[in-house]
Amino acid sequence: MSSTYRKVPINFLKKVLEESLDRMKGSLSERLDRDPVFFPHLYEDNKDIEFAAFIAAQFAYGNANQIIDFLRKLYLRIDGEICRFIKKGKFDKLDGLYYRFQKTEDIKDLFSVLKAILDNYGSLGELFSSLYKGDLRRAIFSLQRELGIFSSKLFFFFPLESPSNPLKRWNLFLRWMVRKDEVDFGIWQFILPKDLLIPLDTHIFKISRCLGLTRRKTKDAKTVLEVTEKMKLICPEDPLRYDFFLCHFVGIDKRCSGFPEDSCKGRCVFYG
């Protein structure tokens, strides 16, 4: 294994990525059932999509199979439209559910906050748009204060302000809401795709290091901003255009290690 820093030319990256997406046009959706974004695709109403997407994104951490397994169990407990379920405020059907750090009561508390958002703001989009003034990170951090959240367990979902927090799950949720393609929904018009930040999961982090998009060794906010800026050189108007493809077809399928290796040749699209 080589630990030598490698910097792949931006023009080459753009060429490979565009060719790859062109070949796979219409087939990215075949991977939906292996991704948390599958669950909001179960709904048609925009409000239902918002809340389903938010819940799916907030539990999108840990082993991919475990994430999907938990979300399946969760959504089986929800009767019909998710907003109707939240509006009723009767969350006994969530009894016994837990996921890693979140126990049943934590999950119920989250749903109680979502009910307050639905009752007081009408939708997640209305709430977020009232706080968004051109700075996504500031808007996310202001949610905790706006909603009057003081439980440390809920800070996992509505984080306190931190200069280092990469906000991976929130950036994933925003990608789903803002971008529009066969994977993402594009139902929030008040944020431009060019202003989104990369959801820096383990796969994207390793790929970014391997391609020379960053030399940083930690998945923090500085790395998020650096990788996003590099992706803007490839696609200024939509830096997250390749996120789903890279995560699934390079990171998961090809098991990118984060380092260029001999075994990458003939296996990874960036090595021919």
Image (cartoon, grey):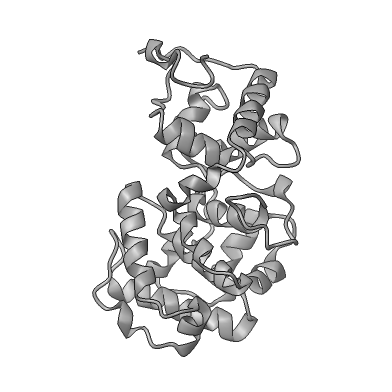
Q: Quadrant of residue 16?
A: top right
Quadrant including the N terminus? top left
Q: Which of the two residues, 200 or 53, is positioned nearer the viewer here?
A: 53
Q: Would residue 215 be visible to someone looking at this image?
A: yes
Q: Is residue 126 above or below residue 249?
A: below
Q: Which of the two residues, 171 or 50, is positioned nearer the viewer here?
A: 50
Q: Position of residue 147 (x, y in %)?
A: 55, 76
Q: Would residue 221 be visible to someone looking at this image?
A: no
Q: Which of the two residues, 64 or 210, is positioned nearer the viewer here?
A: 64
Q: Position of residue 263 (x, y in %)?
A: 38, 14
Residue 210 appears left or right of 151: right
Q: Position of residue 34 (x, y in %)?
A: 41, 49
Residue at x 62% of width, y 70% of height: 46
Q: Position of residue 164 (x, y in %)?
A: 51, 46
Residue at x 67% of width, y 56% of height: 178
Q: Which of the two residues, 6 or 71, is positioned nearer the viewer here?
A: 71
Residue 73 appears left or right of 141: left
Q: Quadrant of residue 77?
A: bottom left
Residue at x 50% of width, y 78% of height: 81
Q: Is residue 159 above or below residue 258?
A: below
Q: Quadrant of residue 90?
A: bottom left
Residue 135 appears left or right of 269: right
Residue at x 61% of width, y 50% of height: 182
